[in-house]
Each structure stands twice: as C-alpha cells, then as structure tokens.
Image (cartoon, grey):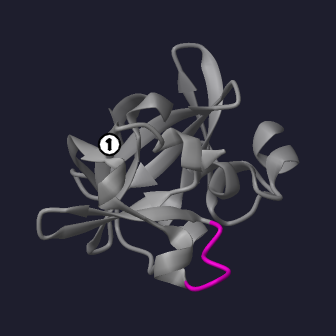
Amino acid sequence: MEQAAYAGEESQLVVFKLDKEEYGISILQVQEIKRMTDITRVPHTPDYIKGVINLRGSVLPVLDLKKRLGLPNGEYTDNTRIIIVNLHDMAVGLIVDGVSEVTAMGTEQIESSQSVAGVNGSSFISGVGKLDNRLLILLNLDTIIIGGQEEKVASL
C-alpha cells in the first residue's frame, strides 16, 4: 500500500515536475533516473503507455505520467526524464517533465489524500506534502501503474 511508503518519522522523496506542479514519490520505489531515450511503440495499448525500452537487456514498459494523470500534453525537452520505479517486482518507466531534487519530509508534513481531495479522495494521490512554501503531490504508484491495468502493463 502506498501510504506505507510515506510512513515512519521521515520519508525520502524524489521530487519531479509535471506541467507546473511538483510531485513526489518515495525514493524506496525508485530504481534509477534516465534521460529521455527512444521508446518502441506497442500496438493496442492505452494511450498513456508510451511503449517499451531496453534497459540493460530487460524490456520494460514506459508510461507517460501526464497522460495517465489526465494532465495537458507537452513536448519532451532536454529536462524530460524517465524515472524507473520498482513496484511488486516489476520495473516500469515514468516519463516526467524533469526531476528537481531528493528531499526528506516528516509524516507531520503530509496531509492525507482525503483531507485535500474530498471524502473519496483521488486514488492516484496518497497525500500532499508541505515543504516550506511548496506543496508536493504524493503519488500512489499502486493505482497509477497497476490499478485496473495490471495485465496490460505486465504483458508488455
């Protein structure tokens, strides 16, 4: 469960940008961060699945995180990165607009998704972190990557 990724006294987060907002995921889920590379399209996949890449002999799916979250599309730039995450022994690439930093955040700085997105909350959001004058949207990778699409992502 994603909430556990932010449990404990302090969590280390990889902070990245999508459009104009900052997002965070637990560093425990991040395998590595790569520059944008050639991606091989796979037919008959959802539009947010950009394709597959070869990472040192392993083929892994790559998701366009902006499309998955329903954000406006943008062009890839020199700052565009692919964050390789490990989730349930499956490596998946997430395309983001840029990675800005790794930071620490205490649990007292994190508001639950229900308190910021209403009673039902958004299943893609684990919470919102308050870091100085900034707000970081903490993502729930379980629902983003696996939620309802496990067979499609895993079959790539």
Task: Please state which amino acid type lies under the numbered disc 1.
Answer: Val
**Is there any visible trace of residue 106 in the rendered image?**
yes
For disc 1, the marked residue is 14
User: In the shown orientation, is residue 66 left or right of residue 78?
Assistant: right
Task: Classify mark 1: residues with Cα within 10 Å, few (<14), some (14-19) or many (20+).
Answer: many
Q: Residue furthest left?
A: 132
Image quadrant assignment for residue 104 = top left
Report the residue at 69% width, 24% height from top. Answer: 89
The residue lying at 79 percent from left, 38 percent from top is: 154
- Numbered disc total: 1
Which range of residues does the magenta coloring cover?
118-123
Between residues 111 and 69, which one lies in front from this camera angle?
111
Does the segment drawn in magenta span residue 105? no
Side of 13 relative to 7 (left or right) = left
**Residue projecting furthest to the bottom:** 118
Whole-percent x, y for residue 129 in the image? 33, 61
Front in this rendered view, residue 96 or 140: 140
Which quadrant holds the C terminus?
top right
Up the image or down, 14 lies above or below 110; here it is: above
Query: Where residue 70 appears, x then y in whole percent?
Result: 55, 77
Q: What main secondary structure does the magenta stretch of the protein show?
A: loop
Q: Residue furthest right?
A: 151
Instruction: Give me the residue at 36% from left, 50% from top.
Output: 107
User: Residue 4, position in %: x, y?
Assistant: 56, 41
**Residue 26's image quarter?**
top left
SS class, disc 1:
strand
Front-most of residues 26 and 75: 26
